[in-house]
Amino acid sequence: MTEVIINLKLEMSELLKKNAPIGVLDSGVGGLSVLKCLKTMLPHEDFIYLGDTARTPYGPRSEAEVRQFVGEMLNYFETQGAKLVVIACNTLTVLGVDTLKDNHEYDIIGMSKGANLVLNASRNKTIGVFATEFTINSGAHKAAILAVDSTATVVPKACPKFVPMIEGERFDSPEIKAAIAEYALPLKAAGVDTMILSCTHYPFIKKEIEDEMGAGVKVIDPAEQTALDTKAALEDGGLLQAEGSGKTTICFTADLERGKRIAARMFDVEACTFQNVTLGK
Ligand code: DGL
């Protein structure tokens, strides 16, 4: 009898864990481009997205500051009982996902650096990387590509103008086109045939970047690979939801209406719940 009760309790707690939401975080609206892939690949899961729109961009900030901010977001997901957290931000991923784990019960998945994706796509092994200055200064993407193929040429370019423009909804503006043209120059000069968008904000302007680079250059977004990594981690941990309709809650630390408009560019927001969240108090 006791054994039956213990087994029943274990089954219940396994079920509760499976039913728990997946946390997805970013400095602002960028991670919504990753949430889009996660929602498509994992339709039965519940998601809680948290974008720190009050303090974006993180790219120009110090390591101490971004570590403090991501710590606050990870604590928030602890209070929400998340079963897994996806860092939908390259700037935070390059801090080292293992260094963010702390005492959190859930596992953490970072953005894919996409080394195999770009190397498989490239013929001339000359690869461009667009990212925030924090990510470019870390050298993480260049190192990841060279670790797979030391003969490759990597052309990293920090693009500090993009995030404020995307957060400011200046999607089709002449300023954003001028910034893309400016940042594309060294990649074009080096003759890249493939490039990776290693900031989750940039897929919002992927089409414009493709237009500037021309038909001969493949522009890769590592979001889908990150969603595949997330699915694999859920399967490994026995946490994958096989049924249910999946709820999405989207939280921002400022400008909820703006966040909602930008989210609508990525997926249907009708069935999503939007909420304000305060961090750091
Ligand atoms: N979306 C983020 C990334 O992938 C951060 C952008 C920022 O806050 O500067 O790096």
Image (cartoon, rainbow, N blue to C red):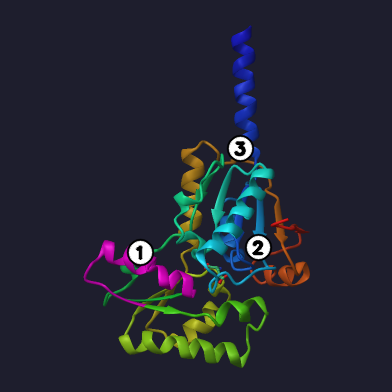
Foreground mark, 3 or 2? Answer: 2
State the residue at coordinates (59%, 53%).
71
Q: Give the magenta part as a residue range.
A: 132-155
Q: Which residue bears the numbered disc 3?
A: 18
Please indicate whether residue 79 sits to the left or right of residue 162 in the image: right
Name the residue: 61% across, 37% down. Answer: 18
Give the total of numbered labels.
Answer: 3
Label 2 or label 1, whichever lies nearer to me, is: 2
**Residue in the image at 51% along x and 49% along y:** 108
Q: Quadrant of residue 262?
A: bottom right
Which residue matches tag 2? 51
The answer to whether residue 53 is left or right of residue 200 is right
The foreground one among 38 and 111 is: 111
User: Are the two marked residues, 2 and 1, in contact with CB atoms closer than 8 angstroms?
Assistant: no
- Cα separation, mark 2 vs mark 1, equals 26 Å
Which SS type dominates the magenta stretch?
helix
Q: Amino acid at mark 3?
A: Lys
- In percent of width and height, residue 191 lies at 31, 85
**What amino acid type is highlighted by mark number 1?**
Ala
Quadrant, the N terminus: top right
SS at circle 2 = strand
Residue 250 visible somewhere in the drawing: yes
Residue 151 lies within the magenta run: yes
Residue sitting at x 70%, y 57%: 279
